[in-house]
Image (cartoon, helix red, strand yellow):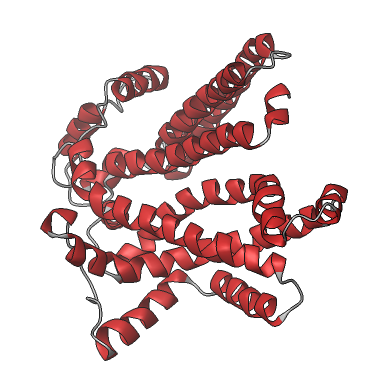
Amino acid sequence: MSRITIVILSYKYEYSILKEYILFVIILLNFFIEFELIFIGVNTLGRYLVQRILAIIPVFMIVAITVFMLIHITPGDPALLMAGDEATPAQIDALRKDLGLDKPIHIQLMNYFKDISRGNLGHSIFNNHDVRGLIVQRLEPTLSIAFVAEGLAILIGIPLGIIAAWKSNTLYDRLIMIFAVGGFAIPSFWLGYNLIWLFAVKLSWFPAIGYNPIGEGIVPWISSITLPCISIGTIGAALIVRMTRSSMLEILREDYIRTARAKGLSEWTIVMIHVLRNSMIPVVTVIALNVPAIFGGAIITEQVFKVNGIGHQLIGAIYANDLPTVQTITFMFAFLIVAFNLLADIIYGILDPRIRYD
């Protein structure tokens, strides 16, 4: 059998797997949509939360299946990629058996779901350690940088957006929008290198690279994450500024705002009570979607600042063809996107009671 024939048969097999996967996804979505129709017309917040939680169950399953299928629809033998060019056929077959790749595709999928439900994320091919243990070891630096950067983006973005909307078409508004446009346009890695050059090399205010665990003290911990947080938090702050400003400007034109001014309410009361809450739904969306984006930005930022976190581990796993680790971290990032979208849906129902009845 020629090499061309083998390649064609391989692609036909991968195409058949892809067709089965798409059919399964359609059936799964149809089942959950019909099941969710039971809750339509119920007006309580509890039922609203049940609807949202039920809606993400098929999403989680689809994400898990998609991550799993990436290995099988990608051309090439995963076992051969992991073993390397110098591996013997016997070693490749042994590795394929250890990974369960010698079993039918549906059996592999069932075993994959079974392992996820038990918290078994597999073993790293590169160092033969449990993937879950490796991720837990690297989790603190990534979580520290991601959540502090998100908090920094919120603390900077919302106040600046309020000021820009309140003082629209003034010098304050123009200066804030320059920051918003520039912050969104500047790549995080470029900003990171410039922050290192200025604050670490020239001024010696912060360390250039590395991470100090929080257990070693608050001050060293804050000092080690300041520059990475500014680097990846600037984009988020710029997005929040723009969304807060545009949403508040739209609310400021409403009739009830003119009525509030006619009643003699102070501008502070109008902006902070009547305008801000009603304009927060688009802002909450940006904040929720920015958290996974910050985790994704950590992949690059950790390389710039030499932080030994999840992003650094993912890059190393890709170079080492460590597919179990890559698969787990990819699923974790997808899980974060779905989870924070659910959180945004819940906050929608709190901010705007009308959404509960949809």
* Residue 226 percent location from the top left of the image: 32, 68
**Residue 314 shows up from this direction:** no
* Image quarter of residue 58: top right
**Residue 185 shows up from this direction:** yes
Q: In the shown orientation, is residue 139 left or right of residue 338?
A: left
Name which residue lies at 52% across and 75% down: 186
Q: Where 210 falls versus 18 (above or below)?
A: below
Residue closer to the observer: 344 or 73 = 344
* Residue 240 percent location from the top left of the image: 58, 59
* Residue 53 percent location from the top left of the image: 53, 23
Residue closer to the observer: 122 or 308 = 308
Q: In the shown orientation, is residue 68 left or right of residue 45?
A: left
Name which residue lies at 47% across and 35% down: 339
Quarter occupied by the C terminus = top right
* Image quarter of residue 157: bottom right
Residue closer to the observer: 319 or 304 = 304
Query: Residue at the front extreme?
Result: 264
Q: Where 156 falls versus 254 (above or below)?
A: below
Q: Where 44 falls versus 260 (above or below)?
A: above
Query: Residue at the bottom extreme?
Result: 202
Numbered circles on residues, count = 0
Quarter occupied by the N terminus = top left
